[in-house]
Image: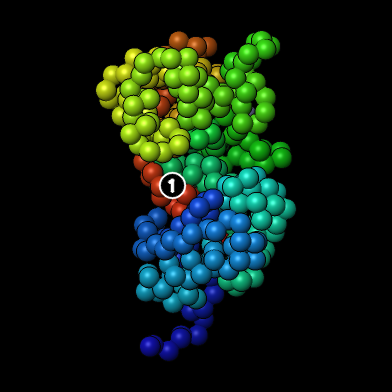
């Protein structure tokens, strides 16, 4: 080992950051260098019901393991960024409530993990973090104004304004899943995960699609989704299963696709009319499974509702590029930006 040169210590000498994706079932940590490349990664189960202190320890272990895998000394790590599945105060790293990780309710995760690791720790909401990842290193590279829409079990989003993540006055900006696209005040409107009718998520999430499929099956509708679901042996209709039914040209699935893409096109148009971003990036499990078959109709239909038609074709509606790595790369980017 070479002797430390005087004056070579301190922040500038620490060239790596660790990005952490904290999920309800697993923790993924990656060491990321200055160019945004992943040097190594480590994974551990979250064990989300085991208590907040244990979750902090497991997070710290996963970070240390990733650093060890990278073959760099721990002191070369400048900071850690974490994406958490919860509303978070990004200035303090305080987690308000995490539906998928109940022990983290009203918990100072940033402070506790920072003490455990002896490093600055920055925490943000996972969808915000994914949006930052796609903006910095994925589909949105080089854009100034961008919106991320993640269609999965629910629908989440994030907003980049002038190259920076926009948190909003109460840190709750970007909740595109709860933009109201269907409220008519009728008694039988679908109810969103938030308990209210009219939200986009009640029409276009995997959960919303599943609800429609189950209602159709219960009503005696003949659909490949029924046979596929039975053959899968699973108790939920996964995005992969939806993709299979679509590939087989199942008429019910085609109908549902039209409904979902219409609602997403309305959402995109509302965002464009309000904010006029140069790019909208679609990610999440449903998008990944259905791909262009989801995006193409949105691209075709959304501009019909744009109030400004001039240059409408310049607004790009594209698929996310980073997949499961958007979280760790976004978290690493946030950590690096905060240090700068
Ligand atoms: Zn809602």
Q: Is residue 281 visible?
A: no
Q: Is residue 214 visible?
A: yes
Please identify the quadrant where the C terminus is shown.
bottom right
Judge the density around disc 1: few (<14), some (14-19), many (≥20) Cα neighbours within 10 Å.
many
Asked if 2 appears above or below 10 in the picture, the reply is below
Please identify the quadrant where the N terminus is shown.
bottom left
Q: Quadrant of ligand 1?
A: top right
Q: How is the image coloured?
A: rainbow
Q: Could you tell whether 274 is left or right of 16 in the image?
A: right
Asked if 79 appears above or below 104 in the picture, the reply is below
Q: Name the residue tied to disc 1.
A: 326
> Residue 146, how many percent across, how many down?
49, 33
Examine the image and state in which quarter residue 143 appears: top left
Q: Could you tell whether 327 is left or right of 168 in the image?
A: left
Q: Could you tell whether 137 is left or right of 100 in the image?
A: left
> Residue 135, how many percent across, how many down?
45, 42
Front residue of 40 and 139: 40
């Amino acid at each position: 080992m070479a002797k430390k040169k005087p004056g070579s210590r301190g922040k500038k000498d620490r060239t790596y950051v660790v990005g952490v994706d904290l999920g309800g079932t697993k923790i993924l940590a990656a060491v990321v260098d200055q160019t945004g490349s992943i040097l190594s990664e480590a994974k551990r189960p979250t064990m989300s019901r085991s208590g907040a202190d244990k979750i902090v320890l497991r997070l710290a272990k996963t970070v240390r393991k990733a650093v060890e895998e990278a073959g760099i000394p721990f002191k070369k790590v400048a900071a850690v960024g974490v994406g958490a599945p919860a509303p978070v105060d990004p200035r303090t790293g305080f987690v308000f409530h995490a539906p998928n990780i109940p022990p983290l309710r009203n918990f100072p995760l940033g402070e506790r993990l920072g003490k455990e690791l002896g490093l600055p720790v920055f925490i943000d909401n996972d969808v915000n973090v994914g949006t930052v990842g796609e903006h910095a290193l994925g589909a949105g590279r080089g854009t100034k104004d961008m919106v991320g829409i993640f269609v999965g079990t629910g629908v989440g989003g994030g907003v980049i304004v002038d190259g920076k993540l926009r948190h909003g006055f109460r840190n709750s900006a970007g909740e595109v899943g709860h933009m109201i696209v269907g409220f008519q005040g009728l008694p039988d409107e679908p109810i969103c995960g938030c308990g209210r009718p009219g939200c986009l998520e009640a029409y276009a999430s995997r959960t919303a699609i599943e609800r429609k499929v189950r209602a159709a099956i219960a009503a005696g509708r003949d659909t490949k989704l029924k046979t596929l679901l039975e053959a899968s042996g699973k108790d939920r209709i996964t995005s992969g299963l939806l993709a299979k039914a679509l590939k087989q040209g199942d008429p019910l699935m085609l109908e549902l696709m039209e409904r979902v893409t219409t609602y997403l096109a309305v959402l995109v148009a509302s965002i464009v009319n309000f904010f006029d971003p140069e790019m909208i990036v679609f990610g999440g499990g449903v998008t990944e499974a259905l791909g262009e078959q989801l995006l193409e109709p949105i691209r075709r239909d959304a501009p019909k509702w744009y109030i400004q038609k001039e240059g409408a074709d310049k607004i790009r509606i594209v698929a996310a590029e980073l997949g499961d790595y958007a979280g760790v790369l976004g978290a690493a980017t946030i950590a690096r930006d905060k240090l700068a």
